[in-house]
Amino acid sequence: MSVQSKSCTCRNETEQEKYDRIAEVIEEYRDTEGSLIQILHMAQGIYGCLPLRLQQFIAERLGMPLSEISGVVSFYSYFTTVPRGENTIRVCLGTACYVRGGKKIIEKLREILSVDVGGTTADGKFTLEVMRCIGACGLAPAITINDKVYKQVNPDKLPGIIDQY
Ligand code: FES
């Protein structure tokens, strides 16, 4: 008996299919208290970001003013209106990390990735962001890539770390 591997097809999902899934999420959560944040999280998970057109769609479905949706999207730094890279690199700029070279880490990453803070590389692989203290101050400077924390990072270590992705 042969075993056929099923490859994931979600990357090929059409725009319409994504909107249909988001519409389902809205119907499912609309009556839950505090549902707007949940809906926005899930919509971003499905679509990759929350462009104005999608915010408009959510506003219409929920019967809310677009300004209210946009206000929430712009308030929380987690939400983004442009697509993020496959991997998100965040450099800690809390006091300890800043003092111990956080700025040099950013400079090196900008150089390696050819991208500014807040930007995404041309190949869509990395988004570079800064963040506040993550509680690793004793081993500063720290960065995160997706959910993984890297401590005592120095600029020379960065190419090796980036290569793992
Ligand atoms: S200041 Fe960077 S981990 Fe605390």
Image (cartoon, rainbow, N blue to C red):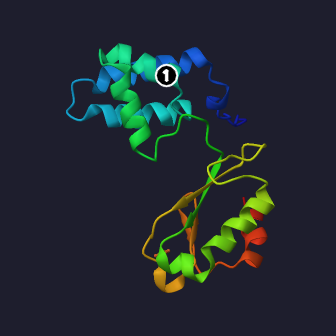
Residue 69 picture location, percent across and down: 37, 28
The residue under label 1 is which amino acid type?
Answer: Leu
Quarter where residue 143 is shown: bottom right
Q: Quadrant of the C terminus?
A: bottom right
Residue assigned mark 1: 54
**Picture layout, residue 158 above or below residue 13:** below
Q: Circle 1 sits in a helix, a strand or a loop, which is it?
A: helix
- Pick the residue in front: 32 or 134: 134
10 Å crowding of disc 1: few (<14), some (14-19), many (20+): some
Q: In this image, 68 relative to 6: left or right?
A: left
Q: Nearer the viewer, residue 77 or 25?
A: 77
Residue 164 visible from this viewpoint: no
The quadrant in which the N terminus is found is: top right
Q: Position of residue 163 (x, y in %)?
A: 78, 63
Relative image position of residue 75 (x, y in whole percent): 39, 42
- Residue drawn at 21 percent across, 30 percent down: 32
